[in-house]
Each structure stands twice: as C-alpha cells, then as structure tokens.
Image (cartoon, grey):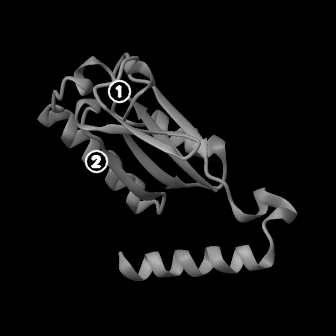
Amino acid sequence: MKFMVIVKADQDTEAGVMPSEELLTEMGKFNEELVKAGVLLAGEGLHPSSRGVRVRFSGKQRSVIAGPFAETKELVAGFWLIQTPSMDEAIEWIKRAPFDGGTEIEIRKLFEAEDFGAEFTPELREQEERLRAAVSEKH
C-alpha cells in the first residue's frame, strides 16, 4: 500500500523560517531509515503559500489566486510518499519522525487500480500502465 504523509504547515513554515541544523540532521537520519527499510518513495518540503497560487475552476472559467492563503493549519508544508504493508505500519513509521509538539501529520492511502472497480476498464488500466512507464523513463 502506498501512502501520502502530509506535514501540515504552521506559522513558522508559512513565514519561511527554515528548520534548524539539528532538525535537518534528525530528518536526514529518519529519511535514511525509511530508505534503508525500502519504505520511502519520495519526500519534499514546500515553500510557503505566499509563493504559491491556486487555480479555481468554475465551468470553463479558470482563475488564478495568488498566495498567501488563510487557515495555516489547512496548508501543507511538506510530504512523504511511503509504501508499507498496512496503515498501521505507516503510522508506526511516522510516529518516529523527529517533530516536537504542535506538528500535525496526516496519512492518506493512495488509490490503487483495484479500488476503482469495474469502471476502470482493461483499456483504462493499460493506459495507466503505459503512462506510468513513460513517466518512469523520463525521470
């Protein structure tokens, strides 16, 4: 099972405050453990929402809204993509992340082909596999 682990933003991340050398060192150790265990697929930090935009869809209309965005607790500061046999194992890994009080992390399972049922036809499955292969070749 694949999971997206979402690290929620806070006032510091939204202000562009960079992590301390100590936290970066601890995060590096944690990420190394994830890699050695074959769990980590990807992981990145994000710039503050003041450097981002949102694209709002309304019928055929598209509008671009520049950040920063309100409700800091609803924003994302970073993420990991991990692969574990179960949600329970994903939770156990994330409990080991080197954060202190106040950090909130959300874990959500990624959809897999079988989650879509009969609507995900053999043709659509083939297209999905072809696209994934093409992306892998390019990156």
79 and 40: which one is in front?
A: 79
Label 2 or label 1, whichever comes before in sequence order: 1
Tell me the residue at 56%/44% (across/down). 90
* Vertical placement of residue 101 versus 9, above or below: above
- Amino acid bearing label 1: Ala
Whole-percent x and y of residue 71? 40, 17
In the rendered image, which quarter contains the C terminus? bottom left
* Vertical placement of residue 20 versus 44, above or below: above
In the rendered image, which quarter contains the N terminus? bottom right
Identity of the residue furthest to the right in this view:
118
Whole-percent x and y of residue 13? 25, 27
In this figure, which residue is indicated by the disc labeled 1? 9
14 and 26: which one is in front?
A: 14
Tell me the mark number nearer the camera, choosing from 2 and 1.
1
Horizontal side of residue 126 vs 5, given as left or right: right
Whole-percent x and y of residue 25? 19, 42
Horizontal side of residue 11 vs 111, given as left or right: left
Task: Give the number of callouts.
Answer: 2
Tell me the distance, in whole angstroms, between the alpha carbons under discs 2 and 1.
22 Å
- Amino acid bearing label 2: Lys
Tell me the residue at 32%/38% (across/down). 53
In this figure, which residue is indicated by the disc labeled 2? 29
Horizontal side of residue 69 vs 37, given as left or right: left
Tell me the residue at 41%/83% (across/down). 137
Helix, strand or loop at mark 1: loop
Identity of the residue furthest to the left in this view:
21
